[in-house]
Image (cartoon, rainbow, N blue to C red):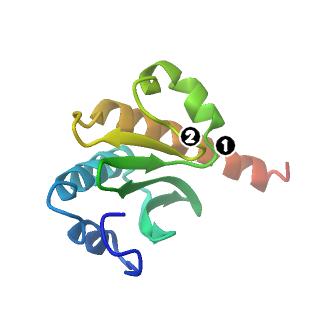
Amino acid sequence: MVTDDKQKFTTVDEYIDAATYDVEPRLAETRRIIRAALPDAEETISYNIPAYKQDGVVVIQFAGYTEHTSLNLFPTAATYARFADELAPYRTSKSAIQLPLDQPLPADLIDAIARFRAEEAAAFVSRKQAGR
């Protein structure tokens, strides 16, 4: 975590401001990319990290750590399948993509993933409203 795990954030500004000097610019840039990709998304804090919701569904989250920033997604299977080639250079886990601090931030990839996840979320909401 970029800060004391006991600190509870209420805004994305608080989260970014609490980051260490080397992580803060990447978090701010990640935020800018996601906001541009998802202009109608609600920016909030979920699980104590920045999150972007559409129609009440979390589309994407991001977080900062000492050696990387991450994109947090759930569910991930379709996203990982769609972006398999682009994600090959990065470490992934069940719900996160790690973006090392010593590599350039992949802005186009972040944008594409955010947009893809928004489409997934919209389809989920449509299915839910249709009772499926």
Instruction: Check disc 2 and report its element: helix, strand or loop.
Output: helix
Mark 2 burial class by Cα count in 10 Å: few <14, some 14-19, many 20+? some
Instruction: Check disc 1 and report its element: helix, strand or loop.
Output: helix
* Label 1 – label 2 distance at C-alpha: 6 Å
Q: Which residue appears farthest toward the right when viewing the image? A: 132
Label for residue 119?
Answer: 2
Label for residue 20?
Answer: none
Q: Where is residue 33 in the image (x, y as percent from the top left)?
A: 29, 45
Q: Quadrant of residue 49?
A: bottom left
Q: Is 44 left or right of 128, judged from the image as shown?
A: left
Q: Locate the N terminus and report the quarter of the image it occupies.
A: bottom left
Q: Name the residue under label 1.
A: 123
**Viewer-side residue, 36 vs 105:** 105
Q: Is 31 left or right of 92, judged from the image as shown?
A: left
Amino acid type at mark 1: Ala
Q: Which residue appears farthest toward the left when viewing the image? A: 21
30 above or below 11? Answer: above
Residue located at (22% from left, 50% from top): 26
Q: Where is residue 8 in the image (x, y as percent from the top left)?
A: 40, 81
Q: Position of residue 9 (x, y in %)?
A: 38, 78
Residue located at (40% from left, 25% from top): 89
Residue contact at pointers 1 and 2, CB within 8 angstroms: yes
Q: Is 76 left or right of 107, judged from the image as shown?
A: right
Q: In which quarter of the image is residue 48?
A: bottom left
**Viewer-side residue, 12 vs 21:** 21
Q: Position of residue 56 (x, y in %)?
A: 59, 64
Residue located at (85% from left, 53% from top): 131
16 above or below 91? Answer: below
Amino acid type at mark 2: Glu
**Viewer-side residue, 92 vs 81:** 92
Mark 1 burial class by Cα count in 10 Å: few <14, some 14-19, many 20+? few
